[in-house]
Amino acid sequence: MKEKSTLFKRDFTLVVIGQIISLFGNAILRFALPLYLLRETGSSALFGMVTACSFAPMVVLSMIGGVLADRVNKRNIMVGLDFCTAVLILIFYLSLGKLPTVPLFITVLMLLYGISGTYQPSVQASIPLLVSSEKLMAGNAVINQVNTLSGLLGPVIGGIMFGMWGIYPILILSIGCFSFSAVMEIFIHIPHEKRIRERGILTVVGNDLKESYQFVKTEKPIFFSVVFLISIFNLILSSVMIVGTPILITQVLKMSDTMYGFTQGALALGGLCSGILTAAIAEKLKLKSSYILLLVCAASVALMGISLMFHIPAILSYWVITLMSFTAMGASTLFVVQIYTMVQKQTPPQLVGKIMAALISIAMCGQPIGQAIYGVLFDIFESRTWIVLIVAAVAAFLIALYSKKIFSQLENSNE
């Protein structure tokens, strides 16, 4: 009788625990730093610009992270970047109030997102090495659940801490999380075959990316259509939620930081519930039906706009926005797990890190542009923010309908 493979073996379990701790610290920071800036300046346009600048390094460095993930020991990347993040937050802690606020925040957020972009490809590329093929989708779902669980606890705890004590205790807690995660990750063993590098690092990066491009061009050209579609969807819909949610709750509805923390927690809870559902029904998910998940995301943003358009009581609008954030994140998580698993299964092992990183980077490249645009739009339509949400939802709805044909082709290429 064949022995049933186990998902939670030692090294995969350590990766999961390290992710929980590291991403928890990251989630608190991503909640507190932009909120602090929005509270200090009160400018939607400035908030959108800083958020856009923060995302830009992630787009570029994700591709470099993919090359590193395929050539450098993935454990060493995780350990080194977690230690670097702890040091960065310590420097920020010592500099806050002594240096100009806006340049300091732009610099630190750019570095944080850049580190995150370099870090995540190593995690994604390590999953196929630590779990069996039949457990791959479940493994991806678990990592996604870790991300969303951290995103659930981080904003809720961050909102309470920020409201009671301000930003400094949050920075101290984050330093502790990243330091502890780095120490624990030292004990992870991820299979690694050292590849000989005879040329300079820039030449190696260029050649590796060229190799990945040639594979996609000749073997999987449908990947180009999928990633372009996701990029446009992120530009239109993901950006409006990233920039819009804190503005709507703290500036338009005049809710407290704790209430905003609960909304961010609900968004992460949607991803967590969806991750659990994905692990349970992995075999029943069909790529050709993925467009329905994008339609759900578009409908969620439309309902947010409708709640503001009819000027219902602020607390009711708050709960509509919170519930729709939960729904949109749930649908988005189902979608992401499907796409990640499909790419991992259809890509040679030596190219997984680079291609995953490149596809994620290109898919995200629309977000900084969208965030900068929506920051200005929320300033222009300050008294009628619902217009921005409704227009974004309609555009996303049309893109989701168009995507039906692309996902049908992707389903066929997967057979």
Image (spheres, rainbow, N blue to C red):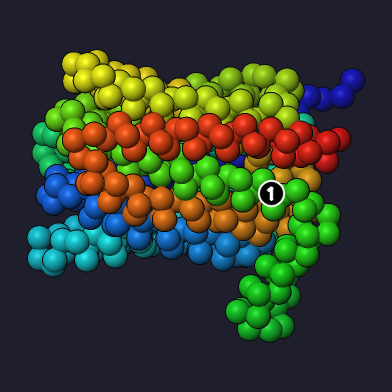
Image coordinates for residue 164, horizontal then vertical, percent:
11, 34
Q: Which residue sits at x=71%, y=45%?
A: 343
Image coordinates for residue 147, horizontal then vertical, percent:
47, 37
Query: Who is closer to the viewer here, 151 or 232?
Result: 232
Q: Up-down: is 208 above or below 312?
A: below
Image coordinates for residue 208, horizontal then vertical, percent:
70, 69
Query: Who is closer to the viewer here, 343 or 189?
Result: 343
Image coordinates for residue 168, horizontal then vertical, percent:
16, 48
Query: Who is closer to the viewer here, 278 or 10?
Result: 278
Q: Up-down: is 395 above or below 212?
A: above
345 on left or right of 326: right
Badge 1 is on which residue?
225
Residue closest to the far right: 1
303 on left or right of 290: left
Q: Which residue sits at x=22%, y=64%?
A: 104
**Local secondary structure at mark 1:** helix
